[in-house]
Every structure is written in C-alpha cells, then in structure tokens.
Amino acid sequence: MGLDRSTLGLGAAALALLAAGPLLPDWLRFVGTVALANALVVLGVLLLMRAGLVSFGQGLYYCIGGYAAGVAGKYWGITDAFVLLALGVAASAAVAAALGLLLSRYREIFFAMFTLAFSMILYGLLTKTQALGSTDGFNVVQASFAGFRPPQASVKGWLYALTVLVAFGCAIALQRYLRSGMGYAGEAIRENEIRVEYLGVSVRRVIYAKYVLAAVLAALGGGLQALATGHVGPDMAYWTTSGEFVFVVLLGGTTHVGAALAASFLFELVKSYVSHLSPYTWQLSLGAVLLAIILFLPKGLWSLRERFARKAA
Amino acid sequence: MLKLTAILVDGVIYASWLFIVAAGLTLVYGVMRILNLAHGSLYAIGAYAAASAIGWYFKAGYVPAASYLLLVGAALAAGAVVGIAVERGVLRVFYGRDEVVMVLVTYAVLLVLEDLIKLVWGVESYSAYQPYQLLGRATVGPVSFANYDFALVGVSAALAVALWWGLNRTRQGKLLLAVIYDRELATALGINVTRVFVVTFAIGSVLGALAGALTAPAISVTTGLGVEVIVLAFAVVVTGGLGSIGGALVGALIVGLARAASVHLWPEVELFVIYGVMALVLAVRPQGLFAHAAARRI
C-alpha cells in the first residue's frame, strides 16, 4: 500500500499541529493535548463500533493506562514518558486479553452492558483503595523523555508534541488497518456474522483482536492524559467517561479516523466552555445532541463532508 | 448459625429490593425489546419525589402512618408522568431501530434526566428517614433488623404475585403476552401495539420509581443514585434471562443471597460476587436461567 490520501492528509495535519505547537496559547495547547489523548480512546471505540460493538466501558482501559503511569511514577520513581506509557499498554493488554475471552462471546446489548459492568468494578475498587487516594485519586509525576528532562515550564509543550505524534501515528496505522482484510472483516461482521463464519473467518478471533487493540489505544490515551493533566482519579473508569467516548464516535461518525480526531477536539473545546458556564445542563445538552445525531445524522458529522462534496461535484 | 440467619435475612431483603428494580427493566425489554438505561434515572426520580414529599409531609405534621400512602403515591405519579413523557416524547420516534441504537437512545435519555434531576432537586442530599424509623426494629434470634426492610419483602412478594396475576389472568395481560410472543402477528390480530407499548413503558417506569421511593427512607438520596442501580439490575435480569419476570425473581434471589453471603463472610470480594454469579450462570446457560423457550419470554 502506497501513500494514500488519508495517510498524507493525516501526516500533513500532524506536521501542521506540531509546527503550530509553540505558537498556540497555553490553554488551547492543553485542550489540544487532552483532546488528542482522548481521541486515542475514541479510535478504539470507533474500531469496535465498525464491527457493530458498542463499548460502554472503554474507561476501564483509559483508567488502567492512567493509573499504571501514576503508580509507576509514584512508587517506582519512573518518570520516562515512554516507559510509563508502555507499562499502561502492557497492563491494559493483559487485562483485555483475559476479559476478551469472555466478552468476545457477546454482541449488542450484552457486550455494551458487560463492558460497562467491568469498568464499574474497577471504579468501585479504586474508590475503596485508600493507598491510591480513594475517590480523590493522586498526582502523577512530571514526565521526562528518554533521559531528557525538560525544564518545568516546557514539559507541557513536549507532552503536546508527544501526544500529537502518538495520536496521529496511531490514527494513520488504524486507517491502514481498517483498509486491510482484517479491518474490513469488522464491517462484514456487523453486516452478517454468519456469512463471515461461512467464509472461513473466526468471528470470535477477529473481535478478540479488535477488543485488545482498542484496549491498547485506550491505555495510551489514558497514560497521555494522566501525564498532561498531572492527575489521575477513579472517575476515569466511571460510566460517564466511557459514555463520552461513545458520544464522540457518534458525533464524528465511523467512516474515517479523521472524524474521531476532529470530533474529539470539537468536543473538548465545547466542553471546556459549556461545562463551566452551566455545569447542570452539560449532560442535558449532550443527551439532546446525541438524540439529534441518531435521528438526523446517523453517520456523524463526517458524513456532512461527503454530502457537500457530492453536491459540489 | 448466627451468620447463616443474618445472611438469609439480609439476602432476602436485598433480593426483594433488586426484584422491584429488575422487574420493570425486564418487562420493558420483554415487550419492547428496549434495554432501558434510563430505568436507573426513574429509580432516582422516584427516590427524590418520595423524599421531598415525605419531608414536606412530616414538616406539616400530619398523621405519620399515612406517609406510606404518600410514598407510594409519589412514586406512581412521578413514574407515570416521566415514563409516558419519555415514551411519547422520545422513544416513539426511534421504534424499529436496532437494539444497540435503542441503548444509545435510552443513554441519551438518561443523560437528559440526570441533569433534569439536578435542576429540579439540586445537588444536596435528601433524607426521609421517618417511615423507616416508624416501624421500629425486630430481632431474629440475636440479630436485629429494621421492620421496614421486612415490609419491603412483603411489598416485593405482593408485586411479584400482582405481576404474575396481571399477565396471566387478565385480558390486558394476555394481550401483552401476545405482543411478547409475536409482535407482528399480534398487530395483525388487531391488538393496538402502540397502546401496549405506552402502557408497558409506563408500568416499567412506575416500577423503577417505586423501587426508588421504597428505598428512599433507608438511604440518603443524592446524585448519581441511578447508575449503580441500572448496572446491578442488568446483572440480575441477565442472570435470570432477559425479558422473563420469573427469571428476574430467581436472579434477584441468587444475586441477593450471594451478595449477603459475601458481605458477611468475605467483604473484600462483594463487588465481584454479583458479576461472578452472573458470569458463572452465563457460562453454563448463555441466555440466562429462564429464557430457554424463545417464545416464552415473560
């Protein structure tokens, strides 16, 4: 596969964001970092949703990724961002490899509710663990990068760059994966599982692989988010967190990974305003927008792009 | 022996609470094929409505004994109003979609309701302890229990009988069963499925609100009440078999007793026990205990 349009477009966007980094005001750069870290989780939800599976518990791996980075820094004195992220990925992959054996047997509402249940178990455990700060969580160490220890003031800038690289790197890889045989198998499963089995593909194995992959992406997102905000808490595993990831996927649509990145950024931007202006109506507006999307834009905002492109042609 | 008594009594009390919550969830799923995530919000609305009504009632200083009527009345009113509003206002538009899409729709409803609860009742907690204390306590052997909790078991059992009787011995209930067996055929036979849906969703919502209202005197009513409930109720319903009322009853008993046993014997694993039981049952019977004949879903 050569350099297709998606790869070039995403690569160009990543370079533009990297170049713009030093010019952005601090708050916007922070929103961008958080948005892209969360976008990694959203990519995983997107991957599962293309196979017809709604995960209401991706916060589980988001939280594991964050807490792995936090615990390794707090108790073992590790500050290297790459090691911290790798630890989160390893922990998440291990948990997903075990839970995936059970979850890959289920579809539809069962899959949705079981993933939700597992993340709520972790939430319950963490709120009862005094050593890890119970409901308050704890602070995460300041990151260093492969031996390089940037001064306090510029750490956020370096984290932003790292997040851009990881998020877009994963997005490009995922887009290529989605265009591969295994990627298309996901859509085939959503359309008709029995036919896929008749073609000689093990549906369970495909779903298992996608589930673990989504967990790895979520752990990366959780780790980066923990390093960027300098704090982890059990709320990362709470159902509202997972619900927001599902919301962002539906907002953007599942046709292209770019939709997940853009929708995640849009979501964080709006959230940082609205949730401060009127904290009691934030979820209400989310719910209303979600209903409107399901009703009027079932393929998400990204489908507007195609609609306009078709009109222009 | 002492522990065994405590486990049995606690387990049955917890199970009776679980059954009231789970019955509404499973009824709505059985008839409408909608897994209603907003069921937990109705539970919360019932709890808030009851707590504020009780608070007002006792402040006004009326006869304390009649507060139980108010408790149930508040739940019935809140559940019916919100349930019908949600069904007619939102769900109706989405009928015929995928089960997963319906989960997302009810998730959106849940988000909206959670904020509406905050807007109406604020974020401070409410308590309505009077009905709980009024009944006093009783001792079973050496262990003391609140009489209110025993009353809850009675209410739950009465509800189970009423639901069974309503479904199997009344005309309306038989119409409902017909819709559950085969929606298309029921429509063809002239059953007004739209009306059945409205009524079912209203009953399901009332059951959710009732569970909340009955729990309100025993707890402090705060935000975020509903969501833990929906996850629990789902575990119960799945253990028993989605859409089966009898399954919800057995599932509630199994989960309730298992949880009580773990609380008394091994409290650290309390969280896992509920899901552990569920996983165990599903490993042997993937459809749950009582969903074996596909047509017999309630």
Image (spheres, grey):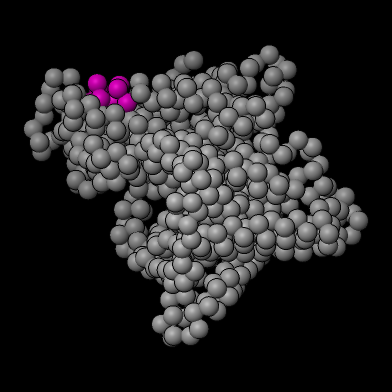
- x and y percentages locating residue B177 in the rendered image: 81, 53
Looking at the image, which residue sits at the far left? A151
Q: Nearer the viewer, residue A61 or B143?
A: B143
x, y (%) of residue B89? 62, 65
Left or right of B76? Residue B40 is left
Residue under the point 72% across and 24% down:
A194
**Residues in magenta, as a range:** A81-88
Front residue of this view, candidates B164 and A54: B164
In the rendered image, which quarter is residue A120 located in?
A: top left
Q: Going 53% across and 55% down the picture, which residue do you hit?
A: B40
Q: Which residue is drawn at 41% across and 22% down?
A: A93
Q: Up-down: is B62 above or below A257?
A: below
Q: Residue A154: horizontal and vertical position, in percent? A: 13, 35
The magenta stretch spans residue B35:
no
The answer to whether residue A84 is magenta is: yes
Q: Where is residue A288 in the image (x, y as percent from the top left)?
A: 51, 59
Q: Which residue occupies 51% across, 30% down?
A: A47
